[in-house]
Image: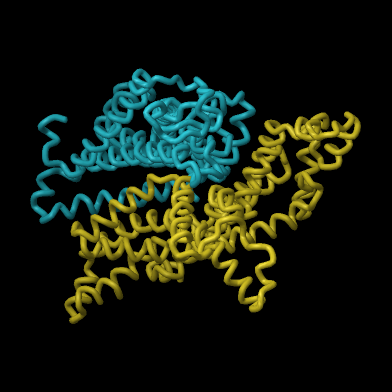
Chain colours: A yellow, B cyan
Amino acid sequence: MAGFLLRRLANYAVLVVLAASLAYVLAACALNPRANLMDRSPRPSASVVDAELTRLNLNDRTPLAHRYLTWGDGVLHGDFGHTWEGESVDGEMWRRAWVSLRLLLGGAVLGGVLGVLFGAFGAMRRDRFPDRAATYGSYLLLSVPVFVLAVLLQYAAERVNAMTGTQLFAWVGESTPGAGDGTFGGLDAFADRVRHLLLPMLTIAFGQAALYARYQRGLMLDVLGADFVRTARAKGLTRRAALLRHGLRTALIPMTTYFSYTFGMLLLGSMFTEKIFGWHGMGEWLVDSISRGDVNVVAATACFAAVTVLLAGVCSDVLYGILDPRVRTRAR
Amino acid sequence: MTGAMRGRPGRGRAIAGAVLLFLLFLLAFAGPLVSPWGWDDIDFTAFLSPPSAQHWFGTTQSGRDVFALTLRGMQKSLIIGLSVAVLSTGLAAVVGTVAGYLGGWADRALMWGVDLLLVLPSFLVVAVLSPALGGSWQALVGLLAAFLWMVTARMVRGMTVSLREREWVLAARFLGVGAGRTIVRHVLPHLASLLLVDAAVNVSVAILAESGLSYFGFGVRPPDTSLGTVIAESRGSATVFPWLFGFAAGLLVLIVLAVNLLADGLRDVLDPQLSPVSDASEPSGSGPSRRADAADGTRAGAGEPAVEGSAG
């Protein structure tokens, strides 16, 4: 298995390098940071703009190959260059990745659990009312774009806030400034963060749950009539116990692939949620840097995305190997 | 819908989706004829007014009629969705069959290209390139299509590899028929149902991707309008002025839902393994829906990387 993993990793590494390079070249050709700088007021002189662009390695008068080599040399030394504001991309990237992670971890876990529960439950009551409801519910949810779902949730939250007369839900940013200054200090600050987390987390969880419920239902239906479930029934387990202890466990194994890939994708794919709820994470960064023409940031996020997706691939391979006894014994 | 299809699982869904889609098309293209306002008309007497007899869906901040704007946006979204689906499925069919039929280095090179495109973050590339290519909707169609075909191409390649060894394909080859002709005449017809379902799925994926990109201002851009730009205009004030957001968002969801129903129904209707006979032999039609769902799961899971923009 080690040889197989190593070969896979080498293949992945080549793909990451290519993806990042392509993203850099595309962004460097297509984006126009010069125009953005020229628009500042008071209008800077041409030589100042040139000097600034050169300092950030964004000058379109330097040959592309030269800029690419400078960038690539930096990346090999672990330096993704500087952002538009002149900060280091590396530091900002870690900070933002951490923000995204705080947002996504809860949403992904909640969505995964809900999805698996609804999917498995639906499959066990196939074609009866709960199954129909779950299936059509997931149909509907999968047809709702995130930016629509987020607004609908905001609308509902506004109603709940007005009805209960409290500020149960908050939907701007990650925390209220000065929330920890009250009598309870840290506790207040924590509660404030949770209130800010609720809506964006639900937005992510709903979409994920709908997706997972469909996968899980299909996988669960496949094991309903499997030999090992029949054996478990034959040894005296109830249908529910047999399905939960033997069926669901087996049906969960392929789900690890979906879990890891979707999570890898989410790290950058949550841009709608982050934008709408004002979280300063990776997704927001990507959108903003494209509109601003910040080539270094665009390339860094592309690299980040490629690495997370491929890491997710490695993760799912390893998890699969650990969870599936057939893979495990074959490897020995 | 002929008699041969009667009793097939998924028929109801396919018909419901098709009817709904037809109605939406009708609304999008016939609606402007009955609307008193054009999509680019400005009513200087009504800014941000709620729905009324004068303006059925209300007006925007600049006094434009939301009904006319929404229908205009629907037209664009529908056209973009359809053209992207046709283009990307066509590309997948060509690349997949050529790679699978020729094998060897052509196969390896094409599949390597597929891997590479899958790793590139599609949202980023489309968002960066779309304005650079002039920002026209035709360019957007091309870009979206360029990032939707890879997974299907892989599936088509796999099926072509097995079809290549079948008697009728071998017979054609030994008779001296060229590769291109063999693919068109003897391989593609066997992939038709897969490609049809894939095209239907791609319509909804493309519409979602387009509206997402336009929402951020990277897709269709003003003065042109799509459902994404109409919804984007309500950004920040959707809960205060719900008419700016609700109608466009609702219609967008309906379109995607109709296409998904149609695609899902078609998948079951066209699956030769799901004959009405086997359906009758099992109580409550369990077998077919089960296999279809499992197939759906793998398909959707594999398709996910290409539609990153709509993932979260």
A262 or A293: nearer the viewer: A293
Residue at the location (22% across, 51% down)? Answer: B289
Q: Quadrant of residue A236?
A: bottom left
Q: Position of residue A192 (x, y in %)?
A: 59, 68
Q: Is residue B93 visible?
A: no
Give the residue drawn at x 59%, y 26%: B135
A323 is higher (above) or lower (below) than B236:
below
Extreme-bottom residue of the structure? A236
On screen, B154 above or below A321? above
Residue A319 at least partly seen: yes
Q: Position of residue B44 (x, y in %)?
A: 54, 23
Is residue A164 shown left or right of residue A188? left
Please provide percent x and percent y for residue B201: 36, 38
Q: How many marks?
A: 0
Looking at the image, residue B303 lies above or below residue A186: above
Q: Nearer the viewer, residue A10 or B25?
A: B25
Residue drawn at x 37%, y 65% is A252
Quick one: which residue is furthest to the front in this view? Answer: B45
Q: Position of residue B225 (x, y in %)?
A: 50, 27
Instruction: Work out whether residue A126 or residue A74 is closer to the camera in this orientation and state it.
Output: A126
Please tell me which residue is depicted at 31% across the width and 53% down the height of the picture: A137
